[in-house]
Image (cartoon, rainbow, N blue to C red):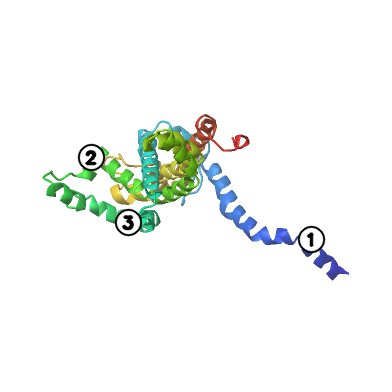
């Protein structure tokens, strides 16, 4: 009887036991770190010396320390340049590749490859070599009669280098845009052509409004990625010159793994989380003004 009861219990709760491994992993590797980082953000937790103080000390320093404020400013600056450029470029290339061109499948693959390789350390190091004083870019500049540019020596030059690295990885956004463009009915373009609308008019009056849900999706994903960018600035410019490319993610890394100040790193990470959440919330609220769904109930 006891055995039958166990079998019955297992049969009735089979679904729970199937999701139990995932649930345990979610609690141990998601919920617990999330909650513990919030607690540590209110302490001066040191990796080797433990906790000796608690309170708002980390948050007070974040809003008064000029280096931390500058890092947040640089992060905003990076996101403002990176996200629009990447979206515009991805949409432009997707629009071209949507036409029936010879060898178009090859170009779709070629443009997508940088998104696969872009996150690797090797690509970041290669990118640094390309923009070195004696790198490929300056070789081309000299070939056309220009003078060498020390990209890494100026704030704007270094920022341009890491922004271009991210913009170059536009393939994932491009593929999503391309799928959306495939969903736009050809009948709409034919009707617009009969009415005398040119390609640009069709693009801005038909294409863009119909793919605004996909633009919105790419905007959110690229915004989150931009604020969390690390590899490019860390490996290509090392945060220089003079902290002009030191994003907040680099400060979090330095505090956590170089200075062992886990409390400060947790507080900075939580401020970053709140900033990204705020921008995401603003985007979701604003979508009512510019995102158009085929079903009005989907707004």
Vertical placement of residue 23 versus 218, above or below? below
Badge nearest the viewer, 2 or 1 = 1
Vertical placement of residue 108 versus 161, above or below? below
Residue, disc 2: 154
Question: Dot 2: what SS?
Answer: loop
Residue, disc 1: 12
Among the two numbered marks 3 and 1 on one chain, the one whose residue lies closer to the N terminus: 1
Looking at the rendered structure, the number of numbered marks drawn on it comes to 3
Measured as percent of width and height from the top left, residue 201 is found at 40, 34
Measured as percent of width and height from the top left, residue 299 is found at 59, 35
Question: Dot 3: what SS?
Answer: helix
Dot 2: few (<14), some (14–19), or many (≥20) neighbours within 10 Å? some
**Residue nearer the viewer, 59 or 141:** 141
Q: Residue at x 13, y 49 (%)?
A: 143
**Residue nearer the viewer, 251 or 61:** 251
Note whether residue 93 is visible: yes
The quarter holding residue 114 reads: bottom left
Judge left or right: residue 236 versus residue 296. left
Position of the N terminus by quadrant: bottom right
Note whether residue 268 is visible: no
Q: Residue at x 44, y 36 (%)?
A: 192
Q: Residue furthest top?
A: 289
Among the two numbered marks 2 and 3 on one chain, the one whose residue lies closer to the N terminus: 3
Measured as percent of width and height from the top left, residue 128 is found at 26, 52
Q: CA distance from mark 2 to mark 3?
A: 22 Å
Badge nearest the viewer, 2 or 3 = 3
**Residue nearer the viewer, 167 or 148:** 167
Residue, disc 3: 123
Measured as percent of width and height from the top left, residue 133 is found at 18, 49
Q: CA distance from mark 2 to mark 1?
A: 66 Å
């Amino acid at each position: 009887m006891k055995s039958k009861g166990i079998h019955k219990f297992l049969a009735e709760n089979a679904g729970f036991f199937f999701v139990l491994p995932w649930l345990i992993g979610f609690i141990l590797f998601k919920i617990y770190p999330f909650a513990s980082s919030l607690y540590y953000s209110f302490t001066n937790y040191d990796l080797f010396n433990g906790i000796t103080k608690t309170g708002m000390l980390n948050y007070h320093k974040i809003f008064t320390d000029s280096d931390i404020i500058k890092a947040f400013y640089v992060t905003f600056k990076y996101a403002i340049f990176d996200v629009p450029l990447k979206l515009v470029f991805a949409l432009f290339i997707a629009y071209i590749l949507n036409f029936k061109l010879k060898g178009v499948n090859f170009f779709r693959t070629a443009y997508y490859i940088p998104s696969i390789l872009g996150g690797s350390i090797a690509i970041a190091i290669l990118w640094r070599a390309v923009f070195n004083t004696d790198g490929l870019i300056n070789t081309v500049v000299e070939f056309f009669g220009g003078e060498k540019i020390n990209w890494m020596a100026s704030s704007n030059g270094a920022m341009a280098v890491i922004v271009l690295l991210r913009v170059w990885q536009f393939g994932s956004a491009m593929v999503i845009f391309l799928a959306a463009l495939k969903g736009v009915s050809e009948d709409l373009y034919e009707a617009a052509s009969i009415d005398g609308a040119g390609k640009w008019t069709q693009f801005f009056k038909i294409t863009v409004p119909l793919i605004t849900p996909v633009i919105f999706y790419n905007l959110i994903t690229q915004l989150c990625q931009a604020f969390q960018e690390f590899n490019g600035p860390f490996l290509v410019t090392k945060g220089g010159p003079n902290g002009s490319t030191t994003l907040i993610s680099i400060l979090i890394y330095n505090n956590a793994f170089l200075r062992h100040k886990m409390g400060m790193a947790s507080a900075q990470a939580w401020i970053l989380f709140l900033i990204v959440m705020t921008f995401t919330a603003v985007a979701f609220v604003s979508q009512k003004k510019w995102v158009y769904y085929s079903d009005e109930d989907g707004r």
